[in-house]
Amino acid sequence: MSSPDLLAPLDAQAMKAIYRRVALIRQAEQAIGKQLRAGRISFSFYPVSGQELAPSVLVGRLGPQDQMVTIYRGMADILARGLPLRQMLAECIGHSAGTCGGKGGGMGLARPDLGLMMTTGIVGSSSTLGVGLALASQLQGNGKVVTVSFGDGATSIGSVHEAMLFASLWKLPVLFVCHNNGWAESTPQSMYSVLENLSERAAGYRMPGITVNGHDPVALDAAFAEAIARARKGEGPTFIESKTYRLGGHYFADAGAYMNAAELAAEKARDPVAALRSRLVEEGLATEGEVADLDAGVAEEVERDIAFVLETPMAPFTTADLTKDVYADAAFTPIALVRPSAPALTTGTMRKASMRDAFNDALHIAMAQDDGVIMLGEDIADPASGVVGISKGLSTRFGSRVRSTPIAEQGIFGACVGAALAGMKPVGELLMMDFLPVAMDMMVNHAPKARFMSGGQTSVPMTMMTLVGAGNGAQHSHSSEAWLMHTPGLKVCYPSNPTDAKGLLLSCIFDPDPCVFIHSMLTLFTPGEMPEGDYRIPLGLAAVKREGKDVTLISYGPTVADALKAADALAAEGISAEVIDLRSLVPLDGQTLLESVRKTRRAVVAHRATDFMGPAAEIAAFLHRELFGVLAAPVARVAGAYAPVPKHTGLLGLHYQGAEAIVCAAKEMTQ
């Protein structure tokens, strides 16, 4: 497939190609409906009748290198781009012959070699992913244009507006294609928008906004050609609203009782597929015989592909298939029973440094080594360099690879996911961990699931850096690592000192999986020592900070200091405590934990996160399961209270009671 001439008008050959694509989409939908009604297949199907034309015209103007992100009602985009029906349908029904091996389903279709980067079932989220892909194109200078498809209902979603802001601000090569079929599920446009044309929203972002008759291929082609030309010239994004009408319910079994019967009948009478067929003949672009041959060829292809899916046996699945493609390493487990090799840190000269210095050093090293490493976040460019100064000097040295963003967490981390899909290694800064829910869609629904849903075709090598406050009140001090540990596909680490902070951050940045790097205000400026130069501390390798024989104190982050203080107090009373700094929470170093607790036969797990359902609960369960007959006492937990973190200093000391509580727990089990 060669890149089209954007200045050339539609000719007879192009119009016939468009018609073949719309005919394929329509006939495929009808054939799928027939199989669903017969009960031969089953999946959640979202018909596209009425909006086949815009995608069929759009792909004719895209080059083979260009990329697309679509949504669950994206069958038209996917078939138009060239994915064979057999692969699409097999994927939709969860068949092993699907393009993603049956792991993504209809809401997770991907085929990167065709430019189909992701299909998402989260309304509106495609927009920020597209921004990230377009940012990668801009930084890599490869000339790729990215198109993002979504329905009219998605224009009410905040992520769409964040994406439009980012794209306009940075003049990204992206097209926002809104398929306005008149309905946001079962709600008509008049009930959720005061605008007659949704393209008017573009004016607020100083980008062209165009409303086009979605039944007119010539008008659609002109709009797409102009927008793609603007994008390729570096002139920024365009919002294109294709106005059509959904010729049925929201989903396959939806009878559409809420729809106006007369209005629906009138829309069916001007069916765009039938209208295009007639237009080809009436304007002399094709003979009746040529169109009939096109229809027959499509019918044969659809019948053959449907039969293939129905007749192809499902490959047997095993538990190994279930966990394959969750992480880059197929053998990955959240609790590792084999330790990775310890890093060699003695080759570098040691210097005094804070954890903030460690982060800055690691980022400078990573960005100097790899042009694909970029950083996005609020206030991170010089001279601000972030609220706590982590990114000092980076934008001065690396220019546009370090960008201060709008205050828009969905936009920041959606862009990180999209850029990572394009092969970059983005680092996004989420200033406070309490803001995690705002970015949760990207960090839970997209970054960790992309590899799995695509059947291993895509990966998201990105890093989220986030800070836990210290007594800054209920909305700036909560430690939410348990949320992230509960998400398959993510890796999570939480260092306690500058040496580990630098080595772990470098490991995260160059890891093939999405990582969350947590740090605390309590340790950010604490002085320590750190090796110069590049070194890596593997995720899943705990550190024994102090050896002992009577009880094991297990912790991470700022609570490691409490555990060491408790060990000193216990030693004064004749109790020998071993202190383990986990360093990474996913994966956990199970081997070190078992070796230590098997020796001491007692364990206290301490962290500042809430006690109930916190990380200590999983660690305690693991130790009880593996060492049930060895333990001299139940594993104890010292953690935050089941309450928001208070601002009041007196209450703050009760929320998490620190070294004193660790000492009490250890003494109780050793007496």
Image (tube, rainbow, N blue to C red):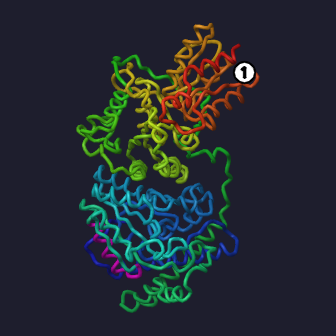
The residue under the point 58% across, 42% down is: 486
Q: Residue 173 or 97: which is nearer the viewer?
A: 173
The residue under the point 42% across, 28% down is: 501
Location of the N terminus (image quadrant): bottom left
Magenta: predominant secondary structure element? helix
Q: Quadrant of residue 334?
A: top right
Secondary element at image label 1: loop
Examine the rendered structure and indicate whether residue 651 appears above or below residue 430: above
Where residue 563 appears, as percent x and y from the top left, is: 55, 20
The residue under the point 50% across, 76% down is: 188
Magenta residues, start to end: 214-229
**Residues packed near mark 1 inside 10 Å, few (<14), some (14 to 19) or many (20 plus):** some
Q: What residue is pinned by disc 1?
A: 633
Whether residue 115 is visible:
no
Location of the C terminus (image quadrant): top right
Looking at the rendered structure, the kind of residue marked 1 is Ala
Examine the rendered structure and indicate whether residue 517 appears above or below residue 549: below
Whether residue 240 is visible:
yes
Where residue 482 appears, as percent x and y from the top left, is: 57, 39
Magenta-span inclusion, residue 216: yes
Q: Residue 260 or 193: which is nearer the viewer?
A: 193
Q: Quadrant of residue 531?
A: top left
Where residue 173 appears, as percent x and y from the top left, is: 31, 59
Lateral position of residue 396 relative to residue 193, left or right = left
Callout count: 1
* Farthest-out residue, right: 629
Q: Residue 457 or 214: which is nearer the viewer?
A: 214
